[in-house]
Image (cartoon, grey):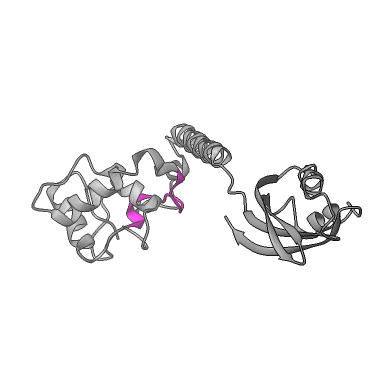
């Protein structure tokens, strides 16, 4: 099993043939298998070996992330077609030579792993920062209130003054007008905009009808989301 000498034309041809119907050395995503074979290739394969060249350029794009790719890197002879003799020396001596278990580049991989971890943390911090700066959408509603007096002798100017004296976080009073209801009586129709999670119609009714000397009742004439 293996590709032979990947620095030779025969080895590159074996690699090209192997990748004719595959995107990666193993599986369906880039892995440590691709890293192991990539590192054994001395450079980009010739243009006529387009399967191998396509694979080489694709794996090269993962160079900064190769330490974080999935899988465990094995000796080179463990990869490739079964009908090609492994001439790398690692496959024939696997399990008999303790030197095969020594990762001469372990420190580099650890450094790259730390670098990949640092990059992930930086990107996560940038994402959280952007998310924190993004303005939160505040749900608001426009409410038209009908405030009815006791009779035609009620001081409507004073009634409106009482209504507008109600202040709360998330409450903004708007325009108003007096609307005839019959028998000389007029009701106060007043607009307000509220933040839904801070001010509700129940609270407005409780506060407005508390002015018992002027207010008989309060009704919601219109309610719209803004």
User: Which of 34 and 88 lies nearest the eye of the viewer?
Assistant: 34
Among the 4 quarters of the image, the one containing residue 26:
bottom left
Left or right, 207 with reference to 44:
right
Q: Which of 206 and 59 is in front in this view?
A: 206
Image location (x, y in percent) of residue 145:
71, 58
At horizontal 27% and vertical 49% (from top left) the residue drawn is 58
Which residue corresponds to the image point at 48% horizontal and 36% vertical from the top-left? Answer: 119
Q: Give the range drawn in magenta.
A: 68-79
Residue at the image position 68 percent from the left and 46 percent from the top: 173
Q: Quadrant of the C terminus?
A: bottom right
Observer-nearest residue: 176 or 106?
176
Instruction: Where is residue 204? Give x, y as percent.
Output: 79, 54
Q: Nearer the viewer, residue 64 or 12?
A: 64
Question: Which residue lies at the image location 22% right of the left edge and 62% below the top edge?
Answer: 18
In this rendering, is residue 48 above or below 21?
above
Q: Farthest front residue?
A: 184
Seen in the image, is 47 located left or right of residue 188?
left
Residue 218 x %, y %: 79, 61
Residue 17 part of the magenta-drawn span: no
Report the quarter where the N terminus lies: bottom left
77 is within the stretch colored magenta: yes
The spot of residue 102 in percent (x, y) is 46, 40
Q: How many marks?
A: 0
Kindly report the secondary structure that dominates the magenta region of the rendered protein: loop
State which quadrant residue 221 falls in: bottom right
Does 102 sit left or right of 29 as displayed? right
């Amino acid at each position: 099993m293996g590709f032979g000498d990947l620095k030779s034309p025969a080895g590159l041809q074996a690699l090209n043939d192997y990748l004719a119907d595959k995107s990666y050395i193993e599986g369906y995503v880039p892995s440590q298998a691709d890293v192991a074979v990539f590192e054994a290739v001395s450079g980009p394969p010739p243009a006529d070996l387009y399967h191998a060249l396509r694979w080489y350029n694709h794996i090269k794009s993962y160079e900064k992330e190769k330490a974080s790719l999935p899988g465990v890197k094995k000796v080179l002879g463990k990869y490739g077609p079964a009908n090609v003799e492994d001439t790398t020396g690692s496959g024939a001596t696997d399990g008999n030579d303790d030197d095969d278990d020594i990762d001469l580049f372990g420190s580099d991989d650890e450094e790259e792993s730390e670098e990949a971890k640092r990059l992930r943390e930086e990107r996560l911090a940038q994402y959280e920062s952007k998310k924190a700066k993004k303005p939160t959408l505040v749900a608001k509603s426009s409410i038209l209130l009908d405030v009815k007096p006791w009779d035609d002798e009620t001081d409507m100017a004073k009634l409106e003054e009482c209504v507008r004296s109600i202040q709360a976080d998330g409450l903004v009073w708007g325009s108003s007008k007096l609307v005839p209801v019959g028998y000389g009586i007029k009701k106060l129709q007043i607009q307000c905009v509220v933040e839904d999670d801070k001010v509700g119609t129940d609270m407005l009714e409780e506060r407005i009808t508390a002015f018992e000397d002027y207010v008989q009742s309060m009704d919601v004439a219109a309610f719209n989301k803004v």
